[in-house]
Amino acid sequence: MELVKAVPLGAILTFVVALLIGSQGSKGGELAIFHVEIYSYDFWWSWPLFFGGTALAWGIMMLQR
């Protein structure tokens, strides 16, 4: 159940960090930040950052269990 709760937190972390780094024109090196356009919405995303943020949130939730 903690993993399900951790996914939105990982997405929020990814959205904020990728927005800050991607809007400056950087790719973030190992973070592999890229520009995404879905319908009329544009945003920055990074799969490595998403998985890392989700794992971090999941680990913190498991420690609090």
Image: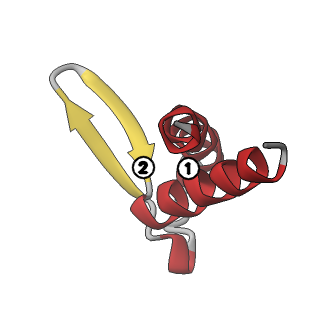
Question: Against 9, is 21 above or below?
Answer: below
C-alpha gap between disc 2 and disc 1:
6 Å
Q: Kindly give the residue lying farthest to the bottom in the view shown.
A: 30
Q: Is residue 52 visible?
A: yes
Mark 2 / mark 1, whichever is N-terminal = 1
Determine the residue positioned at 52% across, 70% down. Answer: 31
Mark 1 crowd level (few <14, some 14–19, many ≥20, 10 Å Cα): many
Q: Horizontal and vertical percent for residue 13? A: 63, 42
Q: Quadrant of residue 40?
A: top left
Judge left or right: residue 58 versus residue 40. right
Q: Horizontal and vertical percent for residue 2? A: 59, 40
Q: Amino acid at mark 2?
A: Trp
Judge left or right: residue 58 versus residue 46. right
Q: Secondary structure at mark 2?
A: strand
Q: Amino acid at mark 1?
A: Ala
Judge left or right: residue 36 versus residue 59. left
Indicate how the structure is coloured in the image. Answer: secondary structure
Of 51 and 26, the residue lying toward us = 51
Judge left or right: residue 40 versus residue 20. left
Q: Kindly give the residue lying farthest to the front in the view shown.
A: 65
Q: Horizontal and vertical percent for residue 49? A: 54, 61
Mark 2 crowd level (few <14, some 14–19, many ≥20, 10 Å Cα): many
> Circle 1 is placed at which residue position?
18
> Circle 2 is placed at which residue position?
45
User: Cβ–Cβ below 8 Å for labels 2 and 1?
Assistant: yes
Quarter of the image where the C terminus is located: top right
Determine the residue positioned at 64% across, 50% down. Answer: 58
Of 35 and 63, the residue lying toward us = 63
